[in-house]
Image (cartoon, helix red, strand yellow):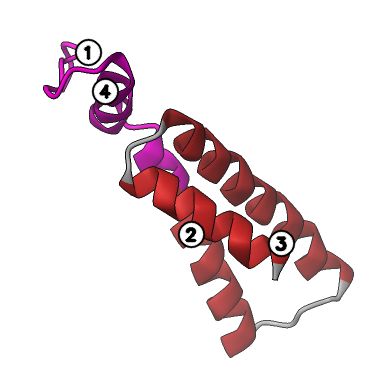
């Protein structure tokens, strides 16, 4: 129940473009990846539909982390914090 409430608060913060929520989501997603991979090894999970589902979850978490680190997304969160409504480019490589 507590974890669900924390994710609700983080989700609400992400919708409101709060930078603390972006960092919290990245950390929690990384903890999920770091927890899942050794657990699969410890329980000796055999290849099958459950392993495919777990790898799918890990892939979605890694993609979410990389999306939250994207320069355009970081600019949106940082421009919200500075009080400007516009997104300013931070990288010439976009």
Q: Nearer the viewer, residue 23 or 53?
A: 23
Q: Are marks 4 and 1 in contact (CB under 8 Å)?
A: no
User: Distance between the Cα atoms at labels 2 and 1?
Assistant: 26 Å
Q: Are marks 2 and 4 in contact (CB under 8 Å)?
A: no
The N terminus: image quadrant: bottom right
Image coordinates for residue 88, horizontal then vertical, percent:
15, 15
| First-in-chain label (2 vs 1) | 2
Badge 1 is on which residue?
Answer: 91
Res. 14 visible in picture: yes
| First-in-chain label (4 vs 1) | 4
Q: Are marks 4 and 3 in contact (CB under 8 Å)?
A: no
Label number found at residue 73? none
Of all residues, the one furthest to the front in this rendering is: 83
Report the magenta residues as a range.
65-94
Q: Secondary structure at mark 2?
A: helix
Badge 1 density bin: few <14, some 14–19, many ≥20, Cα 10 Å: few
Of all residues, the one furthest to the left in this rendering is: 86
The stretch drawn in magenta includes residue 66: yes
| Circle 4 or circle 1, nearest the eye | 4
User: Distance between the Cα atoms at labels 3 and 1?
Assistant: 33 Å
| First-in-chain label (3 vs 1) | 3
Q: Secondary structure at mark 1?
A: loop
| Circle 2 or circle 1, nearest the eye | 1
Q: Nearer the viewer, residue 64 or 16?
A: 16
Badge 3 density bin: few <14, some 14–19, many ≥20, Cα 10 Å: some
| First-in-chain label (2 vs 3) | 3
- Residue 90 lies, with reference to residue 59, above or below; the image says above
Badge 2 is on which residue?
Answer: 59
Q: Are marks 3 and 1 in contact (CB under 8 Å)?
A: no
| First-in-chain label (4 vs 3) | 3
Image coordinates for residue 17, horizontal then vertical, percent:
33, 37
């Amino acid at each position: 129940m507590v974890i669900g409430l924390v994710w609700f608060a983080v989700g609400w913060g992400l919708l409101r473009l709060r930078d603390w929520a972006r960092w919290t989501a990245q950390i929690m997603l990384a903890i999920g990846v770091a927890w899942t991979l050794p657990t699969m090894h410890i329980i000796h999970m055999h290849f099958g539909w459950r392993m495919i589902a777990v790898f799918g979850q890990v892939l979605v978490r890694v993609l979410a982390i990389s999306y939250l680190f994207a320069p355009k997304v970081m600019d949106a969160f940082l421009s919200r914090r500075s009080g400007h409504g516009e997104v300013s480019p931070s990288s010439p490589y976009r």
